[in-house]
Each structure stands twice: as structure tokens, then as C-alpha cells.
Image: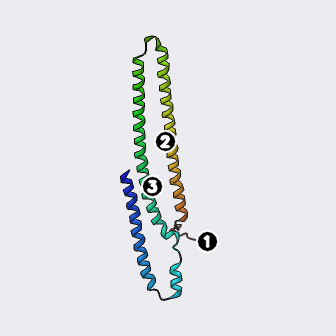
Amino acid sequence: MLDSANTVTDIQYDLAKQAVHSMHSKATEFTKIKDVKEMVEWLKPQSPQIVLPEVMQVQNKITKLLRKNNSEVIEMIESAIDDSKSETREIVKDFVKNTPVSSEPVISTFESIIDASIQSYDQGYVASKEVFEMLEKSFDSTMSAFYDQLAPEKKSTVKRTKVIAA
């Protein structure tokens, strides 16, 4: 997680450096303009098509980092779940060792209940994991659609020939 924090800090630092460099070069450029019309044109905001690739690049870096973090968290959770299941089964075994033989039907029922609850938990975990995967895919498609809307349309390079009807 510390690596992720460093990566986010590096991304922000790089963006800040780029912003300062860009502002400096634009300020230098602006001071050289002598024509009022050119100044007005220069002060117009940039179109989304110009800024979009930079935004997409930063978004991709952050998304990649978040996915990596999510994978690490999932691995930690799965490990904790496995440990918890093992410990629960050990507790049940220890409990069963100290019970009288005549309570075998109760013990069998108790073990079945524990196993069923662990299975139910596993099924719920798998279902929630699938929901998060679907959410991630939905986010990806939404961002892709958003960027596609803002990106300049690519014109077809194939020339169409006119067919003259006889």
C-alpha cells in the first residue's frame, strides 16, 4: 500500500511539474503577443480534444494503480478467510474431542451447521466478487464511452467514387 501512495504522489508531482512548465511557457508566449485579436484568441479555452489525451493518460495510470491495490486487498481478504475457516474447523475438532460418545448425533449436526455456514459465506463472497468485477467492467465501458464522445471523430479515408447511371 505504501508503494501505491508513492505512485499516486509521483503522478501528482509529475502533473504539478507539467502544469508549472506549461504555465511558464504560456506566460512567456503571451508576453510576446502584440496583436489584441491574437491575445483574445490565445485566451480562449482549449478544446477537449487537445486536453483529453492527457486526462486519459492520468486516468489510465490511476485506474491501473487502483486495480493493483484491489488485487492486493482481495488476496489479503482471501488469505484471512482461509485462515478463519481453518481456525473454525480446528475449534470444532477440539470441541468434539472433549464431548462424550453419546452426543455423536448432536456433534454431527453441529459440524454440518458449521460446514453449511462456511459454504454460505463462500457463496456470498463469490457473488460479491462477481458484482465488483461487473462494476469494474461497467466503469471501464462508461469511461470509454465518455472518452469516445469527446474524442474527435475519425473521418473515413476511403474515397467514394460516383457511379453515373446510364
Residue 4 circle label: none
Above or below, 108 relative to 41? above
**Secondary element at image label 3:** helix
Label 1 crowding class (10 Å Cα cut-off): few <14, some 14-19, many 20+?
Answer: few
Q: Do the residues labelled 2 and 1 touch (CB within 8 Å)?
A: no
* Residue beneath disc 1: 164
Above or below, 24 relative to 98? below
Q: What residue type is labelled 3?
A: Thr
Above or below, 124 relative to 70? above
* Residue beneath disc 3: 63
Taking the view exactly as shown, the residue that stands out farthest to the right is 166
Residue 129 circle label: 2
Mark 2 or mark 1, which has the lower sequence index? 2
Q: Position of residue 54 (x, y in %)?
A: 45, 66
**Secondary element at image label 1:** loop
* Rendered residue at 47%/26% (across/down): 115
